[in-house]
Amino acid sequence: MMLDTAVLILNTDRPVREPVAKLRGFIGDQFPDYSLLHHHVEDGYLYTYPKVQYKIIEGTPLMIGIDEGAKVLKEISGDIKRLELGNSIYRVSSKQINEQEAEIIPQRVMYDYRFLTPWFALNEKNYSTFTKIESFREKKLFLNNILVGNLLSMCKGLGIIVNTRLHVHSRLSEERIEFKGISFTGFTGEFTVNFRIPDFFGIGKNASHGFGTVRRIKETGTIN
C-alpha cells in the first residue's frame, strides 16, 4: 500500500534538549483546530496509529505526517517561526519538508532497521511477564513477538491488511527511558523483518511522542 508522507524538519538556532512531549504540546496549542496534531476531540482522544508524530533526533525537531497528517504539516509549516518549549525559546532558522509516496507492505525481502529512539515495547502486563523470563533466548523471542504485534497494529491503524507471516530477528539492548516523569524499560538496537517500513515511522507505544522511531539500514536477502 502506498501512503503519502511528509517529513517536516525544523532547524533551530541551537539543539533542542527538551523532551518530545514539550514539542507536541506546543504545536498542538498553536494549532488547536487540527485534531491530528494533539489527538484531542470533543468526546475524548483519538486512539489509533498517529498520523502525525513528533521526533527530536540528535537535537533536531521534526514531525512526520501520514496521509491526512501530511496535508496538515504542509498547511502549518509556514506558520512555525519559533518553538516555546518549557522555559526555552528556540528560533526556527529554516525548515525543510520532504514529501514522498512511501510503500508499507510485507515483502519476501528482509530489511534491517535501527531504532533512532528507544522502543517503548512493554506495558504493565507484559513487563511483569518479561521480568520473570530468565532465558536470554526466550526474552528475545518474547520481544520479537511484541514487535510483530506492533507492526500489525500499525497496519490495522493505517487500513492495511497483512496476509503474510512476518519474520523478525532482533539485536536489542535494554535502556531506561523517562516519560511523563516516570521511568520505564525501553529498547534500542536493530532488527530485521520481511516488511517495508518508511523511515521515521514510529513503532509501539507512544509513537506520537517519538518513541520507536525507525530507519532502514539495508536490504539483507530474501526468505527461502
Image (tube, rainbow, N blue to C red):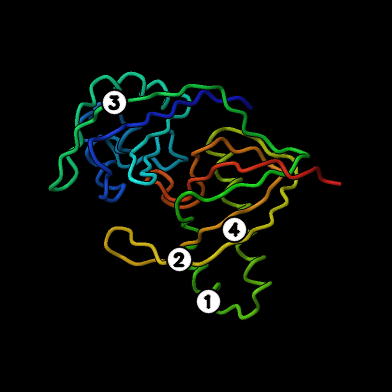
* Distance (Cα) linking label 2 and label 3: 33 Å
Contact flag, marks 4 and 2 (Cβ < 8 Å): no
Look at label 3 and name its amino acid: Ser
Q: Which residue is mark 1?
A: 131
Q: Residues within 10 Å of mark 4 (few under 14, many from 20)?
A: some
**Secondary structure category for the residue under label 2:** strand
Foreground tag (4 vs 2):
2
Tell me which label, 4 or 2, sits earlier in the chain.
Answer: 4
Look at label 4 and name its amino acid: Ile
* Distance (Cα) linking label 3 and label 4: 38 Å
Q: Residue at x 27, y 45 (%)?
A: 16
Tell me which label, 4 or 1, sits earlier in the chain.
Answer: 1
Question: Can you give x and y, in whole percent of width and height, for residue 145 in the image?
Answer: 64, 59
Q: Residue at x 43, y 38 (%)?
A: 50
Label annotation for residue 175: 2
Foreground tag (2 vs 3):
3
Tell me which label, 3 or 4, sits earlier in the chain.
Answer: 3
Foreground tag (1 vs 2):
2
Q: Which residue is mark 4?
A: 146
Foreground tag (3 vs 4):
3
Contact flag, marks 3 and 4 (Cβ < 8 Å): no
Q: Which residue is mark 3?
A: 94
In the drawing, does residue 28 fall left or right of residue 118?
left
Look at label 1 and name its amino acid: Thr
Contact flag, marks 3 and 1 (Cβ < 8 Å): no
94 in relation to 111, above or below? above
69 in relation to 108, above or below? above
* Distance (Cα) linking label 4 and label 1: 15 Å
